[in-house]
Image (spheres, helix red, strand yellow):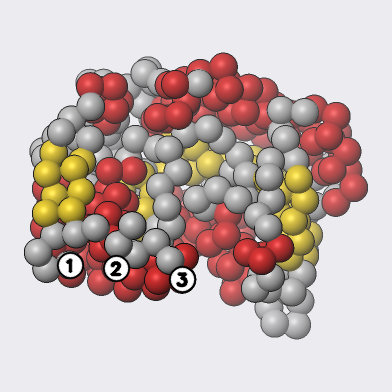
Amino acid sequence: MRILLTGAGGQIGRDLIAELVRRAPAADPPTIVATDLRPPPAAVTADDPPGVSWRGLDVVDEAATRALIADVRPDLVFHLAAILSAKGETEPQLAYAVNQTGTWNVLEACRATGVPRLVFTSSIAVYGPGLPDPTPDDVPLHPTTMYGATKAAGELLCEYYTRRGWVDCRGVRFPGLISAGLPGGGSSDYALFMYVDGVRRGAYEAFCRADTRIPLMYMPDGVRALAEIAEAPRDRLRRCIYNLAGFSPRADEIAASVGRAVPGVAITYAPEPLRQAILDSWPSALDDRAAATDWGWRARFDLDAMTDDLVPRIRALLARTGAAGA
């Protein structure tokens, strides 16, 4: 199978590549073309599995996007390229270009070149204030950020292309994702900073209130979900976009879990109005029964299980990059 990833240098890409290789039959490994605006240097990609290559791609460039997809002729595309919520509010024009125009360009290139299947990554940012708890898949979408608005539009485009029979699009609404890497500009990054700065510095001042509660997910569950929905038979899927639920702790509950694994860590709170407003507009918890029913989705990690797995990974990352104690 030939697989192409856009935005593969971001938070999800490297973990998804590893998951796709792990799941493939040993006798038939996938050919994976990972693309990003600026691919990682060779020293970083040297340990990639066989069959993985990197190419530069700006999804805002329509001609380049179509030419690359026509050259690769993938059987499956994972569209990950996006500007996240916090950065999108400081650079809304860039967020619109990448998230809106870029998604259109990728979908059109897939349609024009006969790519059969695309997996789209959406977000809880498509929601707005006044939500039921937990929030189901089908409620009015009133996003309060450019990121959320463009993701909501991307969902509708995916539904349109699927309905027209042009591309089989399916996707997920991710909670805030946490992985053993550096934060990537999302409003949920306070959770990851608790771990990274908790290990690195022994302290962190969160940009949210202690009682902030949003849905979160550990990255191993996230990339497994992408692989599972990609593999799901189309006739099992009653919709294009599915909620995914992981766990929904308060910020101070995350801090307590970090403190269990990093004794003596000091986590304080200094809410930033813009990012706190974004967080307050998101669901407190998600209802993902549709995903469970249609393709058997179930998260495996809760908060403490994530902490037990994540803290050693962050220690190893900081030791490897020389960032410990920075």
For label 2, the residue is 311
For label 3, the residue is 320
Residue 6 in percent (x, y) is at 67, 45
Distance of label 2 from label 1 (alpha carbons): 8 Å
The kind of residue tagged 3 is: Arg
**At x 85% / y 50%, what residue is drawn?**
73
Splitting the image into 4 quarters, where does residue 98 fall? Answer: top right
Distance of label 3 from label 1 (alpha carbons): 19 Å
Splitting the image into 4 quarters, where does residue 56 fall? Answer: top right
Is residue 10 visible in this depiction of the protein? yes
* Pointer 2 or 1: first along the chain: 1
**At x 36% / y 26%, what residue is drawn?**
127
**At x 58% / y 68%, what residue is drawn?**
18
Between 19 and 256, the one nearer to me in the picture: 256
Distance of label 3 from label 2 (alpha carbons): 14 Å
Between 118 and 314, the one nearer to me in the picture: 314
Q: How crowded is mark 2: few (under 14 residues within 10 Å), some or many (20 or more)?
A: some
The kind of residue tagged 1 is: Val
Tell me the SS state at disc 2: helix
Q: Judge left or right: residue 246 versus residue 65.
A: left
Q: Do the residues labelled 2 and 1 touch (CB within 8 Å)?
A: yes
**At x 70% / y 54%, what residue is drawn?**
34
> Which circle marks residue 262 in the picture?
1
Q: Residues within 10 Å of mark 1 (few under 14, many from 20)?
A: some
